[in-house]
Image (cartoon, rainbow, N blue to C red):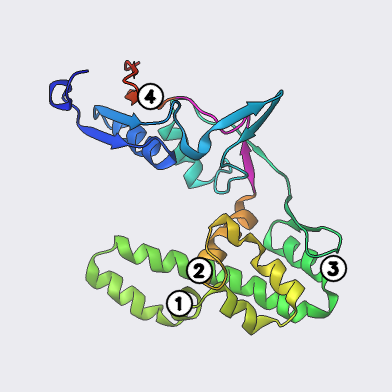
Amino acid sequence: MATPEEKGWDAIIIGSGIGGMAAAAALSKLGHKVLLLEQYQTLGGLTHSFSMEGFTWDAGIHYLNCVAPEDRESHMLDWLSDTPIEFTSMGSIYDNLHIGDAAPLSLSRPYEAQERDLKDRFPGEARAIEAWIAALKEGRQASFTATSTRAMPEIIGSAMKWWHSHAIDLWCKRTTQEVIDEITDNPDLAAAFAAQWFDHGGRPSKASFAMHALITGSYLESGAWYPSGGGAGDVPVDVEVCLKGGVAFPEP
């Protein structure tokens, strides 16, 4: 195999997970010559699919948000992909919670529908549920504010953080568990509030509430979507890939 210097790569990316493939595709789209390296026998990381006895499973994808046709992220994904990925909506009910021996609790979108779902199950907790929905909206906005300051010139970003310091302290600097404990002492309702922590992987006692509000709110606004045909995809356009064992795929 030729050395990177002989091939004249503009970028070499190690690992073909979602991040690696996105970076390789973006650089390739902008005209760079990219080498994507992967030690496993196929590309994809958590986008892998596998089949057994006639059934197929995705290794990592369960549902996605921010890929509704009107979402900015959906347009970005279309730009990254050689062929736009088709997504199927999972409908207004995007999740079902199983808490103890009680009947499953369906979670609907948007915010107003989920508020009704929770009030139907916990009729004596209306004020707490209303406070939770309000916190989700405010926490999501605080997350947008805090992250946007990082893309600004330092003096402007610092001024923005100072101006919004109360909201940032209230929602970004407290954990999900702290916010829940302030709103309710009903253990089942608290479990329902915290149930989607696995979507961002941060335990309620550790993760910023703003992150929880950001992820949960994304489903409430954009819904949940699944890639038609499963999570496995094609190699990004104009990227040469070297897999373990020295197998090389030429550029299209």
Magenta stretch bounds: 224-234
Few, some or many C-alpha atoms within 10 Å of disc 3 (few <14, some 14-19, many ≥20)? few
**What's the mark number on residue 237?**
4
Instruction: Report, in whole angstroms, how far the alpha carbon at label 4 lies from the one at label 2.
Output: 37 Å
Q: Nearer the viewer, mark 4 or mark 2?
A: 2
Q: What amino acid is labelled 1 in the image?
A: Lys
Instruction: Report, in whole angstroms, how far the alpha carbon at label 1 lies from the one at label 2.
Output: 9 Å
Quadrant of the image for the C terminus?
top left
Query: Chief secondary structure of the magenta span?
Result: loop
Relative placement, left or right, of 24 versus 5 is right
User: Sequence-wise, which precedes: disc 3 or disc 2?
Assistant: 3
User: Sequence-wise, which precedes: disc 3 or disc 1?
Assistant: 3
Q: Is residue 161 above or below residue 17?
A: below
Q: What amino acid is labelled 3 in the image?
A: Asp
Q: Which residue is mark 1?
A: 173
Task: Look at the image and say whether residue 23 sits in the magenta stretch.
Answer: no
Image location (x, y in percent) of residue 55: 70, 27
Give the secondary structure at mark 4: loop
Q: Which residue is mark 2?
A: 207
Q: What amino acid is labelled 2 in the image?
A: Ala
